[in-house]
Amino acid sequence: MSLELFNLKGKTALVTGGTHGLGMAIATGLANAGARIVINDIFPEKLENAVKQYKDKGIDVAAYEFDVTDEKQVDEYISKIEKEVAPVDILVNNAGIIKRIPLLDMEVADFEQVLKIDVTGPFIMSKRVVKSMIERGAPGKIINMCSMMSEVGRHSVGAYAAAKGGLKMLTKNMATEWAKHNIQANGIGPGYFATEQTAPIRVGGHPFNDLIMTRTPANRWGEPEELQGTAIFLASRASDFVTGIVVYVDGGILATLGKTTQEE
């Protein structure tokens, strides 16, 4: 099989929230495969800092400040991106939030905010980008950042699990409706990764670190770069007949039940 199937040269990828963490890792991987990268965020300082980090990697990015949950802003800024950079060929719906609050203690406003950003945002973004793809008769790729919480629950993340479960089903419906236009919609479900955000709990003796070490068959945290191969596959011609699935990149957590270390 030719590696050209994975070549993204000439393609434009928009990674929402691509200013840090897993979003930045995915955008970097797509750039290294040849794609032109566009990122967004609602915080200008994050965008400014991210542009510098990408530049240090030798990657030129176009950065735009807008809210993925605001339909008017999305329409305005996608039009700007189309005019100033290029039409979007690959959309990675990465922007999202989590609120770790037990359901009985959670305010409705907090629950709704998580759903709005994690589900409604990808719907608004995808709807606008796909309309443009269809109008110009272009193939397209939608990659939604799902989660292991698309499949299982966990204490204090009920809103997030509801949102990511919803995003999984939204992905399947996107695939169902848009496949006839040669637009594939798939998801990536990351496990637990070594990022700046998880650094405080990735220390020996921390209860959550111990949980990950015993629950993950790979017996380690993932490295953000380990998401890049999956993202490139789902963004490239190599996945042209793959749609409506979620690829879980989790070191095997969802494959097993209980601890993976043998107990005496």
Image (tube, rainbow, N blue to C red):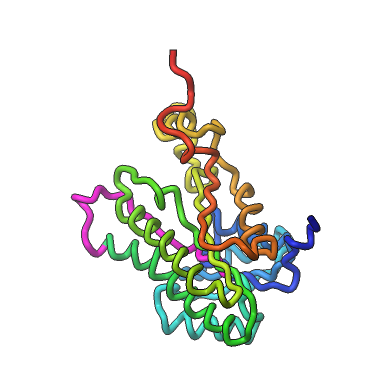
Q: Between 49 and 63, which is closer to the camera in this rendering?
A: 63
| 155 drawn magenta | no
* Image quarter of residue 5: bottom right
Q: Which of 28 and 252 is in front in this view?
A: 252
Q: Where is residue 179 in the image (x, y as percent from the top left)?
A: 55, 72
Can residue 96 be found in the magenta stretch?
yes
Residue 134 in view of the camera? yes
The answer to whether residue 52 of the structure is visible from this angle is no
Q: Nearer the viewer, residue 125 or 58?
A: 125
Q: Outermost residue toward the left?
A: 104
Q: What stretch is highlighted in magenta?
A: 91-109
Q: Seen in the image, is 99 located left or right of residue 50?
A: left
Which quadrant would the C terminus be assigned to in this image?
Answer: top left
Position of residue 139 measured from the top left corner of the image (x, y, whole percent): 64, 75
- The relative height of residue 158 versus residue 89 in the rendered view (above or below) is above
Q: Residue at x 79, y 55 (%)?
A: 1
Count of numbered tags: 0
Q: Is residue 251 left or right of residue 208?
A: right
Residue appearing at x 54%, y 81% in the figure: 78
Q: In which quarter of the image is residue 167?
A: bottom left
Residue name at image x 21 percent, y 59 percent: 107
* Residue 149 in the image, given as x and y percentages of width and height: 40, 49
